[in-house]
C-alpha cells in the first residue's frame, strides 16, 4: 500500500504527462504481481467497492477524533477523505500496514457490515499518505489526472509493446492482469482478444499542406466529405456491441438506438451523426445527445443516431487492416449491400479527375454546411495513429475575427510559468458607449517565441490579478480563427466559437478596429 | 537588539549592520539581570541561533517560546524543555491535520525523484533562513555528494551558516553565465521562484517545495510544486501538545497561528489556555511562516 500511495501522491501533483508516464512505468518495474495489476485497475477505473461509502468513512473519523477539532479541520482542508487521513491517530501498538492486494481482495469479498472494522484496522496501519490513498481507492474517487489511456500508454512505453496491441487485448482482461504483464515482460504470449468488444485505435488524418497537392497523383486518392459529427468505431463482437469515441471511451450508453438489433460481427469506422426529420442535423443536435449519459425515449425519437460508414477493420472474424483502402471499401460496399444494416449508410466517394475540381467543391463547403474534404490514398493500409502521408483532411477555410485580449491565465505543466490561455472579446454597444464582451478562449495557434512575447505583454499590461488569472488593460488585438459560431445561452455574448485558435497577433492594429458583436452574430450557423 | 550571537549574525547578513542601533549577544543559558527580572535564552530548535526567552521574577517563571520545533535538526541545537508557570507558545500548525512525517523520509522522496528523472533539473523551493540549510545538510547526510546549486537569494545565508560551522558541501551559483540548464542537478531557490520566469532556463524542471503547509493538498497545489515535501521548522500538532504538557505550566497563552484549536485541545488535557492576540500579526506574516 505504501508504494501505491506514493504513486497516487506523485501522480496527483505531477503536471507533466511524461512525468506521469514515468511514475507509472517505475511502479510497474518495481512492484511484483498482483499488486501492480491492482494498481493499474485502480488507475483505469476498473475497481469498485460497492460496500465502502463516504458516509461510513465519516462515521469512522468522527468516532476516532474530537468532533470540534474534526469540524474545524474539515473546514480547513475541504475534503473528507483527506481530513480523515490527516487527523487519524493510529491506536498504539503493533499496526501492520496492509498490502494493496490484501485491501483489494478482502474488500471484494467483504460484507457491508464488515467493512468499517476492516478499514479502521488498515487506517491504523498506514501513514497519512497511505490513509489518503486507501480512502481514495475504496471510495473510487482517485482524481489524480490519469486517464485509462494514459495508463495504457505508460505500459506501452515501459514494455516497448505497441499501444494499439495493448488496447486491443485490454477488454478481455481482468485485474490483476497477470497474463498481460507476462506478455509485456516477454514471459508469455500475447493474450487473445476475447469475445467482448475491444477498441482498435483509429487511423487519423493530417492537415493537408495545399502546396504539396501538386506533387500528389489525383488518381491515387479517394475523396470523401468530411462530415460534421464525431468519429467513432462501432464494434460488434460475439458477446456484445459497443461504440467507442476517437479516444477509446465507450459511449454506447448514450446511443442505445445505434446498437439495437445488430446481428453481425464487425469493426466499423464511421461518423456518428443524428437525424432530425430524416435529415442530418447540426453538430449542436448531436451535442444534445452526447450530453445525455442515458437519453430519454423522446430525445431518441426526435434525434435518432446515425452512422455514416467510412471504413471497415474487421468483418465476420477476418482482419482487413492489412488490405488496401480500395479493397476494404469493396468489402464494405458488398457487405452493406447484402446486409442493409439499419441506421447506417456509406460515406459517398466524390468522383474527381483533377485537384481543381475538389478545390471548387471545397470553396462551397461552408455554404453547404460541410466541414471540408478527406483525401485518402487508395493503397493505404489501416495504420493506428496519425501516420504522415496516407490520409489528409482538407478543411474549409476557417472564419476569422479580430478580438481584443481581455484576460490571461497561467497554463499547466511546461507552461505553468507562462500566461498562455487567453480570453478575448469584441466590441458591443451599450448605454454607456462601447464595451468589450468576451467571446472565446484559446491557448494555441502561436509559436513558442510568440508565447514569450504574449506572456511579457500580459505581465506589462496587467490591470488586476485574480489568483492565476490576470485582467489586462485593453491594448492588444488577436486575430482568432475558428471553425464556426453557434448560438449559446450559456455565454453572455450569446454565441460559442468552435475550435478557436490564435491565428495572428496584431501588434499593429488599434483596438478600436477590432470586430463587433453584431458582425459575429451575423455568422452564426443555423 | 538582544539575541544569541548566531541570531545577531543572521540579522546583520539579512538586513545589514544598520538593522539595529545596538547589538548585545547573550549565550544560551547565560543569565542577564534586568532589575528584579532574570532573563536567559534557551534553545528553541527552530533554526540556528533561535531561542526561547526565560523570565524569572520572585520565583515566578515565564517562558516565551518564539518559533520552535521538537525534532532533530542537523543545523541547530535541539529544543530545551524549561518547566515554568506560564508558557507562551506559537501555534503555526495548530490543527490536528498538521502532523509532519519524518523529514528523512521526505528527503528520500526527493532523492527518488532525482533518480527517476535524471534528465530534469530539480528545483527545491525552501525558505532562505534555516529550511534551505537544513535541507542541504540533510541531503549530505543522505549521501548526496553532487554540488548543490543556489538561487542568488540563497547565497548570503548559506555562506553565513557555513562560517558558523555547518557543513554544507560544495555549493555553486545556479545562475551560470554560460546559461547551463543544470539537467540532473538540484537547485535550492525561494518558494516564489520555482514556478516563475526564473525557472524557465532549466531543463524541464521538477518543482519541489518543502514546508509544513504541504501537508494539505489544496495548499500544496497553490505552491504549484510537483513534489511537495512536508518538512517544517515549526512544531506540528503533536509537538505543540507534547510541549505544553512537558513544561507543566499552570497556564498557557497561545499565539501566532490557530489559537482556538490549540486552546480547545489544551482544555481537554486539563491545561488552562487562552489566545493571546498580538497586534500586527497579519495573514501575510502567517504565509511567510514556513
Image (tube, rainbow, N blue to C red):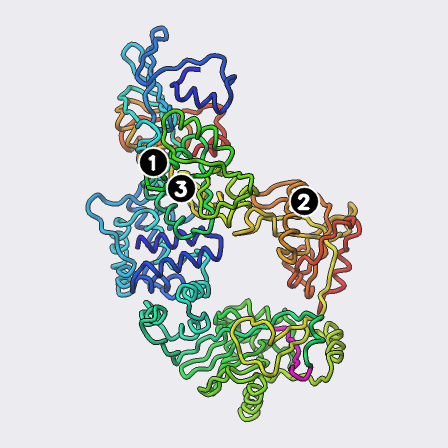
Q: Position of residue B112 (x, y in %)?
A: 37, 49
Disc number lying in front (1 or 2) = 2
Does A251 appear above or below B217?
below
Say if the magenta span includes residue A147: no
Q: Position of residue A32 (x, y in %)?
A: 29, 62
Q: Would you say A292 lies left or right of A51 here?
A: right
Give the quarter of the figure containing the C terminus of chain A.
bottom right
Does A391 appear above or below A109?
below
Tell me the tag on residue A249: none
Residue at image location 50% in from the left, 29% down from the top: B282
Residue at image location 69% in from the left, 64% down from the top: A485
Q: Which residue is mark 2?
A: A457
| Whole-number angstrom distance, CA of label 1 to CA of label 2 | 45 Å
Q: Which residue is mark 3?
A: B146
- Identify the element where label 2 is drawn: helix
- Identify the element where label 1 is drawn: helix
Q: Would you say A512 lies left or right of B209 here?
A: right
State the extent of the magenta-drawn residues as a range: A218-230
Q: Inspect this view and state whether residue B258 appears.
A: no
The chain to which mark 2 is attached is A
Amino acid at each position: 500500500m505504501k508504494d501505491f500511495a506514493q504513486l497516487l501522491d506523485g501522480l496527483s501533483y505531477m503536471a507533466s504527462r511524461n512525468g506521469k508516464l514515468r511514475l507509472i512505468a517505475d511502479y510497474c518495474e518495481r512492484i511484483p504481481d498482483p499488486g501492480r495489476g491492482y494498481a493499474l485497475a485502480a488507475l483505469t477505473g476498473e475497481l469498485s467497492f460497492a460496500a465502502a461509502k463516504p458516509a461510513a468513512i465519516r462515521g469512522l473519523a468522527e468516532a476516532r477524533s474530537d468532533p470540534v477539532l474534526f469540524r474545524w479541520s474539515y473546514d480547513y482542508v475541504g475534503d473528507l477523505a483527506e481530513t480523515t487521513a490527516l487527523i487519524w491517530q493510529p491506536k498504539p501498538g503493533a499496526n501492520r500496514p496492509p498490502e494493496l492486494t490484501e485491501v483489494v481482495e478482502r474488500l471484494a469479498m467483504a460484507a457491508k457490515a464488515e467493512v468499517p472494522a476492516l478499514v479502521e484496522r488498515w487506517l491504523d496501519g498506514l501513514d497519512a499518505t497511505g490513509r489518503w490513498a486507501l480512502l481514495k481507492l475504496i471510495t473510487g474517487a482517485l482524481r489524480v489526472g490519469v486517464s485509462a489511456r494514459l495508463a495504457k500508454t505508460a505500459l506501452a512505453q515501459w514494455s516497448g509493446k505497441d499501444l494499439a496491441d495493448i488496447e486491443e487485448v485490454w477488454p478481455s482482461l481482468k485485474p490483476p492482469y497477470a497474463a498481460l504483464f507476462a506478455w509485456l515482460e516477454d514471459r508469455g504470449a500475447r493474450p487473445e482478444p476475447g469475445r467482448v468488444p475491444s477498441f482498435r485505435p483509429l487511423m487519423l488524418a493530417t492537415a493537408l499542406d495545399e502546396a504539396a497537392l501538386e506533387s500528389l497523383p489525383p488518381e491515387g486518392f479517394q475523396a470523401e466529405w468530411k462530415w460534421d459529427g464525431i468519429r467513432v468505431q462501432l464494434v460488434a463482437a460475439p458477446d456484445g456491441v459497443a461504440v467507442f469515441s476517437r479516444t477509446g471511451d465507450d459511449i454506447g450508453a448514450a446511443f442505445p438506438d445505434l446498437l439495437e438489433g445488430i446481428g453481425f460481427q464487425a469493426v466499423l469506422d464511421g461518423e456518428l451523426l443524428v437525424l432530425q426529420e430524416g435529415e442530418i442535423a447540426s453538430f449542436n443536435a448531436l451535442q444534445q445527445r452526447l450530453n445525455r449519459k442515458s437519453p430519454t425515449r423522446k430525445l431518441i425519437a426526435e434525434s435518432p443516431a446515425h452512422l455514416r460508414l467510412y471504413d471497415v477493420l474487421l468483418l465476420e472474424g477476418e482482419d482487413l487492416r492489412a488490405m488496401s483502402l480500395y479493397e476494404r471499401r469493396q468489402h464494405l460496399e458488398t457487405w452493406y449491400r447484402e446486409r442493409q444494416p439499419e441506421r447506417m449508410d456509406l460515406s459517398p466517394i466524390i468522383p474527381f479527375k483533377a485537384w481543381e475540381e475538389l478545390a471548387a467543391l471545397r470553396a462551397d463547403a461552408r455554404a453547404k454546411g460541410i466541414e471540408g474534404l478527406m483525401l485518402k490514398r487508395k493503397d493505404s493500409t489501416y495504420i493506428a495513429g496519425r501516420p504522415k502521408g496516407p490520409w489528409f483532411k482538407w478543411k474549409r477555410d476557417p472564419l476569422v475575427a479580430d478580438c481584443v485580449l481581455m484576460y490571461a491565465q497561467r497554463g499547466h505543466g511546461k507552461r505553468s510559468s507562462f500566461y498562455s490561455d487567453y480570453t478575448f472579446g469584441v466590441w458591443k454597444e451599450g448605454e454607456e458607449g462601447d464595451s468589450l464582451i468576451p467571446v472565446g478562449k484559446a491557448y494555441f495557434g502561436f509559436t513558442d517565441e510568440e508565447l514569450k512575447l504574449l506572456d511579457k505583454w500580459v505581465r506589462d499590461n496587467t490591470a488586476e490579478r485574480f489568483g492565476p488569472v490576470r485582467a489586462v488593460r485593453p491594448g492588444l488585438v488577436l486575430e482568432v480563427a475558428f471553425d464556426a459560431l453557434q448560438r449559446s445561452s450559456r455565454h453572455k455574448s450569446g454565441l460559442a466559437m468552435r475550435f478557436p485558435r490564435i491565428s495572428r497577433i496584431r501588434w499593429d492594429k488599434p483596438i478600436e478596429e477590432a470586430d463587433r458583436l453584431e458582425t459575429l452574430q451575423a455568422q452564426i450557423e443555423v | 537588539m538582544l539575541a544569541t550571537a548566531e541570531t545577531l549574525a543572521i540579522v546583520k547578513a539579512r538586513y545589514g549592520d544598520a538593522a539595529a542601533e545596538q547589538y548585545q549577544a547573550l549565550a544560551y543559558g547565560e543569565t542577564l539581570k534586568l532589575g528584579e527580572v532574570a532573563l536567559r535564552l534557551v534553545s528553541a530548535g527552530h533554526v540556528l541561533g533561535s531561542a526561547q526567552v526565560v523570565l524569572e521574577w520572585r520565583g515566578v517563571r515565564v517562558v516565551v517560546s518564539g518559533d520552535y520545533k521538537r525534532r532533530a535538526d542537523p543545523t541547530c541545537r535541539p529544543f530545551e524543555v524549561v518547566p515554568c508557570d506560564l508558557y507562551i507558545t506559537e501555534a503555526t500548525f495548530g490543527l490536528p491535520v498538521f502532523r509532519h512525517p519524518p523529514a528523512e523520509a521526505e528527503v528520500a522522496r526527493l532523492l527518488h525523484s532525482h533518480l527517476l528523472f535524471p534528465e530534469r533539473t530539480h528545483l527545491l523551493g525552501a525558505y532562505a533562513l534555516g529550511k534551505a540549510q537544513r535541507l542541504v545538510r540533510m541531503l549530505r547526510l543522505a549521501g548526496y555528494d553532487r554540488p548543490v546549486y543556489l538561487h542568488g537569494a540563497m547565497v548570503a545565508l548559506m555562506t553565513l551558516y557555513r562560517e558558523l560551522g555547518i557543513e554544507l558541501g560544495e555549493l555553486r551559483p545556479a545562475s551560470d553565465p554560460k546559461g547551463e540548464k543544470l539537467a540532473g542537478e538540484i537547485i535550492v531557490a525561494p518558494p516564489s521562484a520555482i514556478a516563475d520566469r526564473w525557472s524557465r532556463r532549466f531543463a524541464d524542471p521538477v518543482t519541489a517545495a518543502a514546508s509544513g503547509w504541504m501537508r494539505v493538498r489544496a495548499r500544496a497545489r497553490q505552491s504549484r510544486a510537483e513534489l511537495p515535501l512536508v518538512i517544517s521548522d515549526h512544531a506540528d500538532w503533536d509537538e505543540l501538545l507534547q510541549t505544553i504538557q512537558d513544561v507543566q505550566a499552570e497556564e498557557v497563552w497561545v499565539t501566532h497561528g490557530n489559537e482556538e484549536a490549540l486552546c480547545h485541545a489544551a482544555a481537554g488535557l486539563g491545561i488552562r489556555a487562552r489566545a493571546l492576540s498580538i497586534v500586527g500579526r497579519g495573514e501575510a506574516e502567517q504565509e511567510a511562516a514556513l
